[in-house]
Every structure is written in C-alpha cells, then in structure tokens.
Image (cartoon, helix red, strand yellow):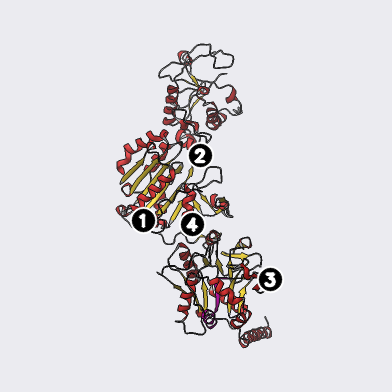
C-alpha cells in the first residue's frame, strides 16, 4: 500500500471522528447507564433476568426487595403504580446529570445484547426518553384516537421498558401522586398523548423495536436468529434485533421459550451453556447427608411389566435410607405385585405409605394427599412423582435430578418410535398441547440441554420448599376443567415457577397401556406388539444378540441347531400359562383343532391359538428365529413358511411324552427353550 494512500485514509478517519465530536454524537460511556427494576420477591423469572444482565455486564439496581406487592394484578387489570413510587424515590438519590436510566420489568424480561448496543440505538433515536411500543392499546382503548400516527411501526406506548436521561425522567414522573394499584401505563400514556408534554419532555416510541420488543400482539413477528455462535431474537416485520425482550401480558410462555436460547443459553456451536450452573453435587456429601426424597408411585390402570418396574426401583443408585415410598394403587389386578414388593423390600426404605384399591381414593386426591405428606414432613427435601408406566432405565436418575437444583425438573422420556414424550413445548390458546418449534429436535436429541417448558407429566422431581412456600394450595391436582397433571402444571405456571425437562442423559421410556388385557395368567407375554423393547428385555435371552458373533450356536446333529433365545422366566411363564389353561389334547390322530382334523404325528399338547397367542408366536418366530434359520440354511426364506408349516403347539415333556420322543427322534429344530420342543411339519 502506498504511503500517500495510508495518509489519506488516516485523514479521512480523523475527519469522521472530528465530525462526530463536533456534532455532539460521541458515544455515551457504558458506565453512565444504570438499570433500575422492581422485584418484591425473587422469582425464577427474576433470576433469569439477573443472569442475562450479568452475562452482558449491566449495572442493575433492584427496587422494592422484601416489600409486599400492592401494585395489583395488571395481567388482567390496570396496575403497577407501586413501581413508579419506588422509581420516584430511587431517582432522588441519583445526583449525576449525565446518568442514563433504563427502567424495565424483570420477571418476564431478558437482555439479548449489551449496554454498548443499547446506548448506541438510544442515541440514534435523538430523543431524551424512549418508550417501548406495542401494536395493541392498553389499558384504555378509548384513547386510541389521541395517539399520534406513525409512518411505520407500532403506535402505542408500553410502560414495561423505557430509557432516558435522568433529568427528563425525573421531570416526567414528578407529578406521580397516585396509589400503588393505579396504572403506570395509563399515567405514561396520558403524558405521551399530550402534544405539549410530549414535545417538552422530548419523548418518543421505539416503534420498530430496535431497543425493546414487547411480545404481546407480536408473536408472529419474532423468530430466533442463530449466527456465529450467538442467538438473537429478530423482528421480521421491521428487520430489527431488539436489545430487551419483554414477555408482557399473556406471552410469558413464549418468553420462556426464547429464554431457553437467549442470551446464548443454547447455541448450535456450544450446546447448553447453563446446564452446569448452580449445581449441588452429591459427591461431596456422605450418603446420610443426601437430600431426603419421597417417591410417589401411582398405579391407576392395568399396566404391563409392573414387577419389572419394582425391580428397577430397587436398582436406583440412591441410598434407600434417604428414600420414603408412597404407593397409590387403584388397580386390584396389581395388588399382589405391590404387596410382594412391600413384603420383600419395604423395610429397606425409611418409610412406606400404601393406599390400597379398597380405600377408593381417586387419582387427583391421591396426588394431593402425597404432596401434602411431603409438605408437612420437615425431613422431605424433594418429591419424586413416578407413574407406573415409566420405564426408568437410568439408575442415576435421582442423583442427576437432585444435583440440578431446580424447582421442578423432569427427565425426558419418550415412547418408542413416536414423537410422544412427557413434556409439552408449548400450549394452545385453550391450555392444551401445542408443538413448539424445537419440540422434535429436543425429543430426537438434536438439541440437548435443560428446557423451560409449560407442562411435564409422568415423572418429575419437585423441590419440597416450593410446596411449603408457593404451592401451598392442598388441591393442586384437583380441577373442574383439567385432568390432574394439567391442573398441577396450571397452578405452577400461575405462580411463575419454571418447569424444566432434562434431555442431557438417556433416562428411559414410557410403556404403552392401550391394549393391555388381563385375561391370562402372565399377561406380559402378549406385549410383543405394544411394547416390543420391554418384551425383549424380559423374555429374550441376554446372549441372543451375541450368538452369531460369539458362535453360541450348537449343532448336536445334522441340520439341527441349538441357540439361546428365551430367558428362564419366559420358559417358566409359557409352562405356567399352558398349565393354567390346562386343556391338553388327547394325543390321538383325530384332532379337530387343525385343518382336515387328522394329525399324522400326534402329541399331547396345547396349540397357541387356543390361548390366543398365535399372532404373538408368529411375531416371535419371524423376529427371532427366522433370521437365524436364514443364516443356517442359506437360500431358504421364511417369510411365509412359518405361517403355513409350523405346527404351533407346546407340550411339556416333564409330564407327557411326545410322539417324536416315543419314536426316539429329535424335533426338526431345537433351541435352548429349556425342555420345550418345536415340531415342524414337512
């Protein structure tokens, strides 16, 4: 680069700086900015606000701490005057004339960028005070005609956020003499719509949402923008990137959604950046010092694999003397399984409470009762809600959730092959399920972290301190309009308490109970279609998947192969199921159960179709036996032959000799099904 060009470039830069200085457009120093907000108690939303302020290094002064809120419920009616009283008093202590004040709400606000950008955009507005704007008028729609028109952007004032020079703000609120429950927004509106006051105070609105984004009336305008490891909220209507996001009015849930990402809480490059904040590690504690958890187990309908549920409960990696068990059972069919668990293992736990079917308590009342037990128990630190349908595979679930130190947190579980899960990412207008933009990515594990969600169910951990402070209503689960889980979540949302779902780990899955029938002795055997993974874990031998790799197939004689396929439990259940049925054939050639009525090689047996197990048996053969036969007999396929040539029957050679055994012959193919044989008709 030539020296003359460098000189010219330097001279131009100096000219630009000199021009900005001479025209009074020097950037406002960041230390001149003070953020004022009102928070009479420290809610989850307030904690989120402070975190975003700390992330961007804002200086924040909180007003009203410890004071009782008397500003009304301005979600549904005008209010908020208490904020102006506190602000007016706080401004008296600020003497610097150069101070810039940003006054905003905090429970439903997050910062999306830092002070430098905020001050630059404020300076570019060229007014002494800038208010946030809204597309909807509040609280007096009769004042609409008095609002000045704007060429483009929102027309109406929002009092949830404004920024200005301290002399102008002091002058603006000097005349506030109203009560704590009067409307702050109406007060500012009347100042703004008065042309003389608007000009004197030099007030304007941030009509295109360059500084403030109020979400009410603008949900369709705001999207997340991921770029270069950062996340911003972009207003697509005006193509702006607001600095302050405010979930005003009925948009708290959308604010929670945006707060999952902003400020840079989760990005594609970094993943979750807040998941390991404020943890309470258990590793530094003795087992006797672990939080005491009350586990509430709820059985409301016939459910498969209940015995397995209790087996998994025993395997939880948490000291059992720090666990109390509450069991509510509405289903008499499962009473013997519950009693068996309590008889064998109940004494291992610190305490046990069992509500039996004969007590005739409904599900909502049982949940209210269980939560109240924890509420009144000074030892109870957490309540762990656990439905019987939950397959909790992760043995460290309780440790993981308690270490998270969150108000309410659910381990994410799903139903195999479906997008069903135990949380909702959003709510519809009538309070029911709606799919959030990130729901599928969270369920399928493409986005992993901690997610603030409006609804959790089936399995979740509740901090017991909430039950004693915020959730003191006994009937949290009882509602005329909602089912028990929806009623609980509705109560939690109304209190401003955050619910989280954790998909940082694989926790388990949910059983399908839709077609579970109780007409057999071992009804779980019939779950191969509805719950195939659980059926396999229960009934298929652990070495089945290894047999080809580890050469576990034996060849006792030509064209006969032995291999592990069933567990001992499966064998026992099949034997017991047949013995329970008890209608053994006569062992003669005449057999009315088969087509043609004649059996060439008679046995004393029971056919699968006699116990309505034929389609399940076909499924088993095609899923677990056919793949092996195709490897053992290359070129032969079993797509149809199992439906046509296999004589589906089981006999018990411990009691009755089959015709094949009487003739000293082997069955045509064998497996390690204990003493069972499968007879193939050629």
4 or 1: tag closer to the N-terminus: 1
Q: Quadrant of residue 130?
A: bottom right
Q: Position of residue 320 (x, y in %)?
A: 33, 46
As drawn, 478 above or below 38: above
Q: Label 3 crowding class (10 Å Cα cut-off): few <14, some 14-19, many 20+?
A: few
Q: Which of the two discs, 2 and 4, sits closer to the camera? A: 4
What residue does disc 2 label? 512
Q: Nearer the viewer, mark 2 or mark 1?
A: 2
- Report, in whole angstroms, how far the alpha carbon at label 4 lies from the one at label 3: 35 Å
Secondary structure at badge 1 equals loop
Element on which disc 4 rests: helix
Please name whichever residue, 370 or 522, is drawn nearer the observer in this view of the structure: 370
Q: Earlier in the sequence, mark 2 or mark 4?
A: 4
Which residue is nearer to you in this view: 191 or 641? 191
What residue is shown with label 3? 152
Residue 59 visible in the snapshot: no
Q: Are marks 1 and 3 in contact (CB under 8 Å)?
A: no
Q: Are marks 4 and 1 in contact (CB under 8 Å)?
A: no
Residue 525: x and y in percent read 47, 31
Of labels 1 and 3, earlier in sequence is 3
Q: Which residue is mark 4?
A: 493
Report the residue marked by disc 1. Answer: 282
Picture layout, residue 168 above or below residue 252: below
> How far apart in space, not on screen, are marks 4 and 1 (Cα)?
29 Å
| 419 with respect to 674 (left or right) | right
Q: Quadrant of the C terminus?
A: top right
Front-most of residues 545 and 642:
642
């Amino acid at each position: 680069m030539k020296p003359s060009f460098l000189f010219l470039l330097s001279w131009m830069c100096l000219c630009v700086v000199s021009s900005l200085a001479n025209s009074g457009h020097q950037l406002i120093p960041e230390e001149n900015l003070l953020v004022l907000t009102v928070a009479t108690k420290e809610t989850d939303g307030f904690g989120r606000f402070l975190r975003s302020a700390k992330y961007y290094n804002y200086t924040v002064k909180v007003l009203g701490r410890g004071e009782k809120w008397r500003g009304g419920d301005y979600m549904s009616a005008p209010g908020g005057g208490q904020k102006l009283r506190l602000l007016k008093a706080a401004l008296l202590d600020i003497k610097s004339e150069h101070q810039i004040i940003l006054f905003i709400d905090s429970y439903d606000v997050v910062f999306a960028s830092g002070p430098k950008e905020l001050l630059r955009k404020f300076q570019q507005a060229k007014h002494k005070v800038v208010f946030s704007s809204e597309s909807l008028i509040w609280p007096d729609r009769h004042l609409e005609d008095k609002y000045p028109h704007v060429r483009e952007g929102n027309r109406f004032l929002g009092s949830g956020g404004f920024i200005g020079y301290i002399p102008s703000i002091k002058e603006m609120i000097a005349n506030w003499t109203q009560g704590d429950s009067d409307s702050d927004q109406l007060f500012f509106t009347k100042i703004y719509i008065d042309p003389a006051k608007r000009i004197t105070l030099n007030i304007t609105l941030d009509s295109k949402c360059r500084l403030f984004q109020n979400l009410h009336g603008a949900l369709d305008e705001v999207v997340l923008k991921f770029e270069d490891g950062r996340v911003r909220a972009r207003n697509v209507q005006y193509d702006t990137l607001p600095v302050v996001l405010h979930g005003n009015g009925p948009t708290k849930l959308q604010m929670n959604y945006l707060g999952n990402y902003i400020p840079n809480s989760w990005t594609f490059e970094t993943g979750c950046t807040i998941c390991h904040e404020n943890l309470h590690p258990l590793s530094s504690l003795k087992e006797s010092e672990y939080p005491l958890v009350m586990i509430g187990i709820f059985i409301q309908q016939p459910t498969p694999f209940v015995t397995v549920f209790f087996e998994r409960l025993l395997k939880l990696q948490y000291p059992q003397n720090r666990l109390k068990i509450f069991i509510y059972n509405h289903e008499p069919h499962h009473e013997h399984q519950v009693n068996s668990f309590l008889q064998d293992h109940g004494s291992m736990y610190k305490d046990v409470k069992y509500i039996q079917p004969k007590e005739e308590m409904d599900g909502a009342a049982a949940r209210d009762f269980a939560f109240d037990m924890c509420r009144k128990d000074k030892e109870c630190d957490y309540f762990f809600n656990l439905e019987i349908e939950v397959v909790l595979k992760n043995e460290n679930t309780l440790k993981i959730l308690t270490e998270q130190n969150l108000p309410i947190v659910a381990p994410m579980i799903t139903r195999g092959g479906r997008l069903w899960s135990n949380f909702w990412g959003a709510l519809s207008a009538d309070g029911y399920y709606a799919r959030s933009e990130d729901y599928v990515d969270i369920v399928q594990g493409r986005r992993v972290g901690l997610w603030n969600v409006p609804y959790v169910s089936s399995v979740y951990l509740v901090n017991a301190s909430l039950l004693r402070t915020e959730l003191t209503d006994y009937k949290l689960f009882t509602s005329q309009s909602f089912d028990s889980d929806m009623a609980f979540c509705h109560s939690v949302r109304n209190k401003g308490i955050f619910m989280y779902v954790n998909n940082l780990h694989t926790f388990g899955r949910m059983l399908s109970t839709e077609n579970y029938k109780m007409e057999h002795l071992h009804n779980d055997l019939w779950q191969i279609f509805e719950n195939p993974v659980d059926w396999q874990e229960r009934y298929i031998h652990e070495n089945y998947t290894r047999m080809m790799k580890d050469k576990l197939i034996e060849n006792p004689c030509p064209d006969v192969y032995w291999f592990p396929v069933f567990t001992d439990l499966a064998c026992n259940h099949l034997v017991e199921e047949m013995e329970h049925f008890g209608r053994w054939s006569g062992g003669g050639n005449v057999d009315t159960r088969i087509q043609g009525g004649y059996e060439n090689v008679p046995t004393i047996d029971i056919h699968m179709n006699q116990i309505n197990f034929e389609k399940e048996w076909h499924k088993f053969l095609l899923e677990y036996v056919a793949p092996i036969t195709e490897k053992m007999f290359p070129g032969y396929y079993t797509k149809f032959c199992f439906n046509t040539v296999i004589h589906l029957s089981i006999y018990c050679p411990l009691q009755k000799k089959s015709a094949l055994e009487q003739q000293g012959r082997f069955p045509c193919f064998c497996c390690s099904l204990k003493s069972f044989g499968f007879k193939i008709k050629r």
